[in-house]
Structure formats: C-alpha cells, structure tokens
C-alpha cells in the first residue's frame, strides 16, 4: 500500500462498527457502504468477542464484496484480549492474506511485524510521542490513527519532530472525526453490570442498546456511554466544522458508524472537505474540545 505525504486532499473512512447490532443490520449497513463515497471501510469486532453475530469468514465475505465495489478494506482487531481463543482469532485475522489489518493492541502489531505485513495502528494503541511512532513505522506501520484525546497542536509537534520528518512519506495519518469517542476498555462489562448481570452471564444485553447506554450525572448531563467493556464519551465528537484545520496534517478522517444518519454525516464531511458553504454544520450538543487542546466536553 502506498502512503504519500499528507496533502490538502482529505479522504473519508468508515470506522468499524463499535456497537452490537443484529447481523441483518450489519449487512444492510455494508450494502450501503459499498455505494457510499468513503473510499476506506473498516470491518470487524473491536470491543467484545462474545458478539458473534458475524464470524471471521462472514467479515471476509463482506470485505470481498466491498473490495469489488472499489473500497479499500481494513480488518480491525479486538482492543482488549482476555482469552486464548481471542489470541487464536487474532492470529487468523493477521494471516487473512487478503486485507490490511488495523492493530488495536500491541500484540497484533507484533504478529503483523513477524509476518512482514504492513498494518494500521488504531486509536487505542498509546502512541504519545515521535519516538514511539517512528518505532512503529520501522516495523510496518502504514497508517496511524491518532489517539482520540489528543489535539491538533500535539499532532503538529509530533509530525514536525526531527525523528519523524524523514519518515513522513511512509505513513498516513487518520483522525477520529465523528462519533462517540472510545475512551477506555475494562475486563468488566459495565453494560451487564448496569443490568445487575455478571459478565459471564451477560445474555448479550448490549444488543438492547444499539448506540450504547447513556450515563447521566445527577443534573442530567450526558457523561459517558456504556458499550459493553468499552466506555465512550457521553457526547458525540464532531469535527465537521474543523476540516480546514486538518488540511496538510491529516490524510483520512474517520466516521464512526451510528445506528442512524451515518451516511448523511459522511456526506456532510465530504461537502466540508470540498468547501461547500451549504454543508451541514455541527449541531449544539456535539463537541470538539480535544482537537483544540481543551476538555473533551467542550464545543469550540
């Protein structure tokens, strides 16, 4: 995969579905993805291995359909591995032989490096300085998704660091630009706990919350979103009004799939990238603080 130095020509990507949707809904979503404007599509389960509506072979078949439709397909891995079976499936994903892999855990980076394969590093991997980024590039990184809590100023410092400047034409930069931010993962399942269920007998209760379960403060403010073992931001992150500040630094903007209006917002981002003055703007309630080196719940 060729990864040129960042230009003003931003591209869009559909990130992996982070919620537990029924198989029919997932398939319908990717049928729409096949004809949408995003050139890059991520597939796979990144949150919980108990969500088995689709198996690896199902994801590969969907990926083949998307590839035939002209999409660049990337298989995403689990973020938190807790059992030997999950490691075995990770090995199968890394050895899929068809698609680029997004490593959401450093063990996936090691497996892909051992096979001499290029890879994407997802936002859950703690890359907080130029030395770490350079280390990953030397091991095969071809696209890097910046951790969601970091800012434009931080990104600029890293990309202009003398350690990175000679390597900049070897990788792309992707930024999470729309959706509830993935903030943390835990061995506990907070969705199950919210229903007073043990994790081992969760009965896949997260399937009742197709956009996660809201957690509000005593004054009614959205604080977090529970999504199985993943904790997300309570408010939706949205950089649609910040596109100009991404130009020249970022190659790909990630749209995280939502149960509704994902493709409407994809169109809004495409219009913003194209400079359309009639485009949809960020609604009140969506936030963008992290990009501006402010508290994440801030809207600038």
Image (tube, rainbow, N blue to C red):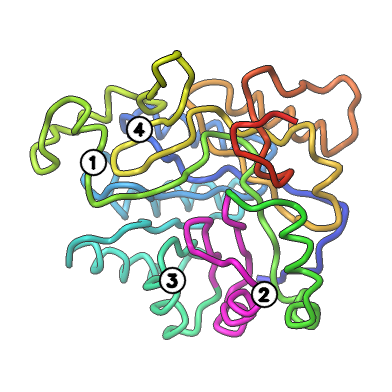
Q: Give the secondary structure at mark 3.
A: loop
Q: Give the secondary structure at mark 2.
A: helix
Above or below for 270 versus 170: above
Q: Horizontally, is 261 left or right of 110 in the view? A: right
N-terminal-most mark, 4 or 1? 1
Q: Indicate which label's residue lies in the foreground, 3 or 4.
A: 4
N-terminal-most mark, 1 or 2? 2
Q: Indicate which label's residue lies in the foreground, 3 or 2.
A: 2
Q: State how far apart marks 1 and 3 are (Cα).
A: 33 Å
Q: Which residue is mark 3?
A: 97
Marks 1 & 3, CB-CB < 8 Å contact: no
Quarter of the rendering occupied by the C terminus: top right
Mark 1 residue crowding within 10 angstroms, few (<14) / some (14–19) / many (20+): many
Q: State how far apart marks 3 and 4 are (Cα).
A: 34 Å
The stretch of residues the image draws in magenta is: 119-148
Marks 3 & 4, CB-CB < 8 Å contact: no
Q: Which residue is mark 2?
A: 130
Q: Which residue is mark 1?
A: 189
Q: How many marks?
A: 4
Residue 224 placement: quadrant: top left
N-terminal-most mark, 3 or 2? 3
Q: Is residue 216 magenta?
A: no
N-terminal-most mark, 3 or 4? 3
Which residue is pictured at 47% across the width and 82% down the height?
113
Q: State how far apart marks 1 and 2 are (Cα).
A: 34 Å
Q: Which residue is mark 4?
A: 226
Residue 131 coordinates in the image, percent (x, y): 63, 80
Q: Nearer the viewer, residue 39 or 45?
A: 45
Residue 19 coordinates in the image, percent (x, y): 38, 35
């Amino acid at each position: 995969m060729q990864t040129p130095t960042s230009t003003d020509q931003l591209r869009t990507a559909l990130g992996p579905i982070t919620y537990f949707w029924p198989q029919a809904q997932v398939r319908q979503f990717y049928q729409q993805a096949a004809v949408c404007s995003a050139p890059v599509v991520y597939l796979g389960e990144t949150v919980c291995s108990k969500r088995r509506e689709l198996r690896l072979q199902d994801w590969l078949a969907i990926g083949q359909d998307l590839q035939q439709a002209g999409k660049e397909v990337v298989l995403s891995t689990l973020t938190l591995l807790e059992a030997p079976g999950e490691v075995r499936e990770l090995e199968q994903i890394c050895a899929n032989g068809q698609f680029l892999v997004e490593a959401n855990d450093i063990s996936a980076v090691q497996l892909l490096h051992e096979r001499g394969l290029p890879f994407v590093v997802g936002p859950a991997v703690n890359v907080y300085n130029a030395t770490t980024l350079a280390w990953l590039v030397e091991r095969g990184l071809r696209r890097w998704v910046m951790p969601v809590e970091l800012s434009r100023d931080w990104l600029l410092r890293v990309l202009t660091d003398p350690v990175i400047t000679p390597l900049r034409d070897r990788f792309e930069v992707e930024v999470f630009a729309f959706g509830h931010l993935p903030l943390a993962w835990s061995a506990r399942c907070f969705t199950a706990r919210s229903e007073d269920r043990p994790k081992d007998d969760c009965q896949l209760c997260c399937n009742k919350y197709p956009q996660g379960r809201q957690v509000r403060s005593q004054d009614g403010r959205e604080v977090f979103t529970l999504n199985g073992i993943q904790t997300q931001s309570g408010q939706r992150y949205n950089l649609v009004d910040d596109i100009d500040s991404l130009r020249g630094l970022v190659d790909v903007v990630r749209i995280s799939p939502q149960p509704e209006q994902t493709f409407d917002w994809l169109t809004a981002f495409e219009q913003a990238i194209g400079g359309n003055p009639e485009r949809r703007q960020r609604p009140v309630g969506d936030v963008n603080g992290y990009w501006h080196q402010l508290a994440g719940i801030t809207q600038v």
